[in-house]
Image (cartoon, helix red, strand yellow):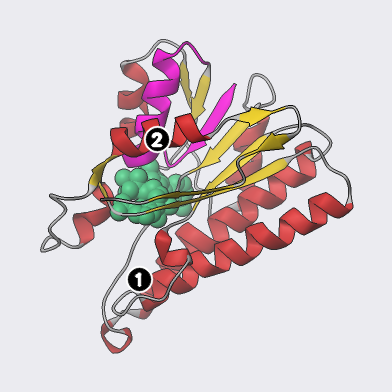
Amino acid sequence: MILITGASSGLGAALANQYSKAGKDVAITGRNQRRLEAVAADNRNIQPIPADLANPASISALFDQLKTPPSTIIHSAGSGYFGKIQDQKPEEIINLFNNNILSATLLLKEVVTRYRDQPINVVIVMSTAALSPKSGESTYCAAKWAVRALVESVRQELKAEKSPMRLIAVYPGGMATNFWNIEKDRDTSTFMSADEAASMLIQALTSAQHGYISDITISRR
Ligand SMILES: NC(=O)c1ccc[n+]([C@@H]2O[C@H](COP(=O)([O-])OP(=O)(O)OC[C@H]3O[C@@H](n4cnc5c(N)ncnc54)[C@H](OP(=O)(O)O)[C@@H]3O)[C@@H](O)[C@H]2O)c1
C-alpha cells in the first residue's frame, strides 16, 4: 500500500491516479474531504483519509486508520507564498511554515517512530527552491531549505541506527497545478503538468538489492 499526502490536488493526486491505474492500493490524504473523494471516485483502489498534517493528533489518527502498513509514503503536501519580504503578511508566512516545515517534521517524526525497523521508502517532495535562493521567494525557500535540513539530518539518524527505512528527496521545478492559484499573474504555460511530473517520479523511484535513487531533481525544460 502506498500512502500519498497532498493528494487532494496537483502532483499528489496525479501520483495517486497513476499508481491506482497500475493496480496498486493507495491511501490518499489532504484536508479537503470533497476533493479527496473526487480523486478516489475515479479509482477503485484508493482510500481517502482527511488529515491536517500541521496537527499532530490528526497525523496520528491518519496512521491509525491505515488498513496495512505502507510500503511507500510520498509526502507531497505543501503550499507556496511569494513576494518581497517587506510585502509578506505574517499570518501567511505562518501558514506557509505550517504547511511545509511543520507538516514534514510531524509526518516524519510519526513515520520514523512507527516504522523505522521496516524497509519503507519515505519520499519527501520539496522543490528546486530547496537547492538555491530565489529573489521574491525568500520565505518559500526558507521553508523548503528547512525541510531539506530535516531530511538530511534524519537520514543520518536512521543510518546510525542501521534502520532499513530509506528517505528519498525530490526536488521538482515548476508544475502547473493549484499551487499557483495564489499568483494569478504567474504564466505557467511552460510548466510541467502534474501528470508529467508524476510519471517521471514514479519511473525514478526504482531500487535494486544493493542500491536506490536517493535524490531526484525533476527539472522543467
Ligand atoms: N507546483 C509547483 O510549481 C511546485 C514546484 C516545486 C515544488 N512544489 C511542491 O510540490 C508539492 C505539491 O505541490 P502541488 O503543485 O501539487 O500543489 P497543490 O496542487 O496545491 O497541492 C498541494 C497539496 O498539499 C495539501 N496540503 C497543503 N497543506 C496541507 C496541510 N497542512 N495538511 C494536509 N495537506 C496539506 C493540499 O491539500 P488540502 O488543501 O486538501 O489540504 C494539496 O493536496 C508541494 O510540496 C509544493 O511545495 C510545487
Relative side of 45 to 191, left or right: right
Q: Give, as a single range, the part of the protein colored magenta.
A: 1-24
Q: Quadrant of residue 117?
A: top right
Identity, as a three-letter code, of the amino acid under mark 1:
Glu
Disc 1: which residue: 92
**Considering depth in this image, is 217 or 91 the residue closer to the camera?**
217
Up the image or down, 169 lies above or below 102; here it is above
In three-dimensional space, the C-alpha distance between marks 1 and 2, rounded to whole angstroms, equals 31 Å
State yes or no: Cβ of the residue under disc 1 lies below 8 Å from any atom of ligand 1: no
Quadrant the N terminus occupies: top right
- Please give the name of the residue rendered at 64% of the width and 19% of the height, measured from the top-left corner: 67
Instruction: Give how far across and how far down residue 102 sits, in percent.
Output: 56, 61
Q: Helix or strand or loop: what does disc 1 sit on?
A: helix
Q: Label 1: how many residues lie within 10 Å, few (<14), some (14-19) or many (20+)?
A: few
Q: Helix or strand or loop: what does disc 2 sit on?
A: helix
Q: Quadrant of residue 68?
A: top right
Disc 2: which residue: 200
State yes or no: Cβ of the residue under disc 2 lies below 8 Å from any atom of ligand 1: no
Relative side of 24 to 21, left or right: right
- Please give the name of the residue rendered at 32% of the width and 32% of the height, measured from the top-left corner: 34
Instruction: Give how far across and how far down residue 51 sits, in percent.
Output: 50, 41
- Please give the name of the residue rendered at 77% of the width and 39% of the height, measured from the top-left corner: 114
Q: Residue furthest right?
A: 161
Relative side of 73 to 142, left or right: right
Instruction: Give how far across and how far down residue 57 sits, in percent.
Output: 63, 47
Identity, as a three-letter code, of the amino acid under mark 2:
Met
Q: Label 2: how many residues lie within 10 Å, few (<14), some (14-19) or many (20+)?
A: few
> Tag 2 or tag 1, which sits nearer the N-term?
1
Q: Residue furthest bottom?
A: 86
